[in-house]
Amino acid sequence: SEFCSEIWVRTNGEGNMDEFSPTGDLVAESYPNWLRFHIGINRYELYSRHNPVIDALLKDLVTQRITSVAMKSGGTQLKLIMTFQNYGQALFKPMKQTREQETPPDFFYFSDFERHNAEIAAFHLDKILDFRRVPPVAGRLVNMTKEIRDATRDKKLWRTFFISPANNVCFYGECSYYCSTEHALCGKPDQIEGSLAAFLPDLALAKRKTWRNPWRRSYHKRKKAEWEVDPDYCEEVKQTPPYDSGTRLLDIMDMTIFDFLMGNMDRHHYETFEKFGNETFIIHLDNGRGFGKHSHDEISILVPLIQCCRVKKSTHLRLQLLAKEEYKLSTLMAESLVRDRLTPILIQPHLDAMDRRLRQVLNVVSECIDKEGYSFVVEDDLHGVKGTEPVHSGPRQR
């Protein structure tokens, strides 16, 4: 693997995990699934297309015994870090609203709830789009008493537990926005749904770089961002590193399409692994504000694609395939999501909305091609393919 952790490097200068292991009698296959997932990360993806470790890791997220719980610092809403008996860790986002509830029309995107089912659905969508840039996420029914309250050493979290008038166990934790008695998370009577997202490698082993999204929203009730008022904004972005070479601008287009299909307006920053420099994929983290409204398509999310008129050939071909009746996006999503423990993850109107939005993405690309020509819009990232690995070349200069 291109992304071997310090464990292998320290025990074997070559990092050859098949011939040598720290204990002398174990091979990579006997390591916990979370570690095997970490070792499999490379420059182009978090996991390979047919990696059996991912299904095993998803099962671990649902079945491994939770040994400790802590609140994650920062953020507007409560998230918990859960540690399992095999020392793996995951980020737990508790259920805040039902599958049927839509984001109220008067809510700003930055004051919207984070949805546990959106995190689960985002992982499946990312996989179906063949991006593989979202860490594995699984839904789990958690016993709030045994698996959170009794497992935490965090007194601040422990003190926020109470019994509601309806005799349900509730807690609210500490955070900067929705952590109060009025926004308490309550079980039935002490069971609560949540999403568990597998942790990425520790930052001490694999530093990540945080980038400001060029098409970041203003996060202000009255101010507009520059891209909202300047139709030529993309030309400016294209002259700024790292968007002036390599695949980064095209990766932003992938992320734009991914967010539009989910209705996620909250992509203010993104991360990459520092080790791989600028020639690497964008990690699609924090997708909890997707799937808020099925009755509305937020076209402003597509502005980067509309302004830049650029897309990878691999992405364009995949989208065209998912628009066909026999490989319909909504059908593939429904088939994929039914495997999650908390199924149904999305109600039908959200699945239908994805098909509708996919057609809109393809229409935007078609308009771009009509205006600028196929070869200027669609970047051939499949040229010279050996097997299934694309050759990642820099974007063509106009």
Image (cartoon, rainbow, N blue to C red):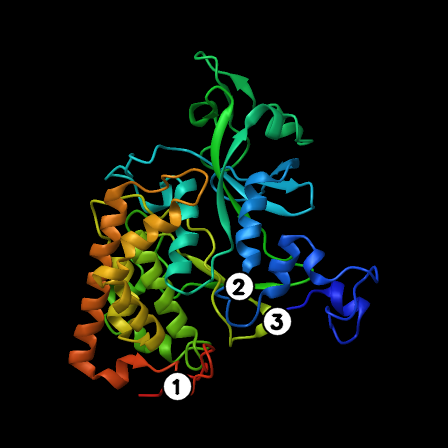
Residue toward you, 145 or 215: 145
Q: Residues within 10 Å of mark 3 (few under 14, many from 20)?
A: some
Q: Is residue 250 above or below residue 269?
A: below
> What's the distance in space between the residues labelled 2 and 3, CA to CA?
17 Å
Residue 333, image x, y percentages: 34, 52
Figure quadrant of residue 232: bottom left
The amino acid sitting under disc 1 is His
The amino acid sitting under disc 2 is Tyr
Horizontal side of 378 relative to 212 (left or right) equals left
> How many numbered tags mark residues here?
3
Residue 95, image x, y percentages: 43, 34
Horizontal side of 73 relative to 77 (left or right) equals right
Determine which residue is flagged by label 3: 275
Residue toward you, 67 or 113: 67
Q: Earlier in the sequence, mark 1 or mark 2?
A: 2
Q: Is residue 238 above or below residue 175?
A: below
Figure quadrant of residue 157: top right
Residue 47 image label: 2
Determine which residue is flagged by label 1: 383
Local SS, label 1 = loop
Residue shown at 59% from the left, 23% from the top: 145
**Viewer can see residue 181:** yes
